[in-house]
Amino acid sequence: MQRSLEQRMAIKFCVKLEKSAAETIPMLKKAFDVDCLSDRHIFRWRKAFAEGREDVNDENRARRPSTSSSDDNVKRDTHITT
């Protein structure tokens, strides 16, 4: 999550310097290597900042909460029949 935020700040900085997407993407890939956002996400964030967005944080989404299963929250039938 933190790396994503850092990259969004870098994208915003590149937009302020009037760098194109073609210039921004290789710089981010060099700086963040395998942790780099996908080209698609870089384009999306770059467009948002170019259109005047200032906030680098994700917007809250109205969606179903994520769920997970673990041994602590899964009820199991312990009665074994043979």
Image (cartoon, helix red, strand yellow):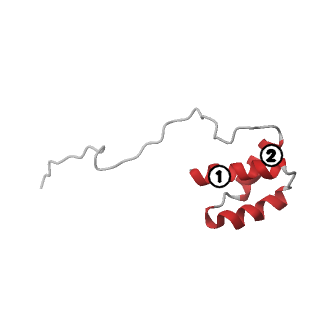
Whether residue 25 sits left or right of residue 6 in the image: it is right
Measured from the top left, where is residue 46 in percent x and y? 78, 48
Instruction: Give how far across and how far down residue 72 sits, in percent.
Output: 28, 46
Q: Nearer the viewer, residue 81 or 8?
A: 8
For mark 1, give the secondary structure. helix
Q: Label 2 belongs to which residue?
A: 47
Q: Name the residue type under label 1.
A: Glu
Q: Quadrant of residue 28?
A: bottom right
Q: CA distance from mark 2 to mark 1?
A: 17 Å
Is residue 74 shown left or right of residue 52? left
Q: Quadrant of the C terminus?
A: bottom left
Decide: few, some or many residues near mark 1? Use Cα within 10 Å; few <14, some 14-19, many ≥20.
Answer: few
Name the residue type under label 2.
Lys
Q: Is residue 53 left or right of residue 19?
A: left
Q: Nearer the viewer, residue 65 or 28?
A: 28
Disc 1 target residue: 6
| Residue 34 placement (x, y as % from top left) | 62, 66
Report crowding for label 2: few under 14, some 14 to 19, many 20 or more residues within 10 A (C-alpha): some
Task: Kindly indicate whether the residue at mark 1 contacts the one at mark 2 (C-beta within 8 angstroms).
Answer: no
Q: Earlier in the sequence, mark 2 or mark 1?
A: 1
Residue found at the far top of this picture:
62
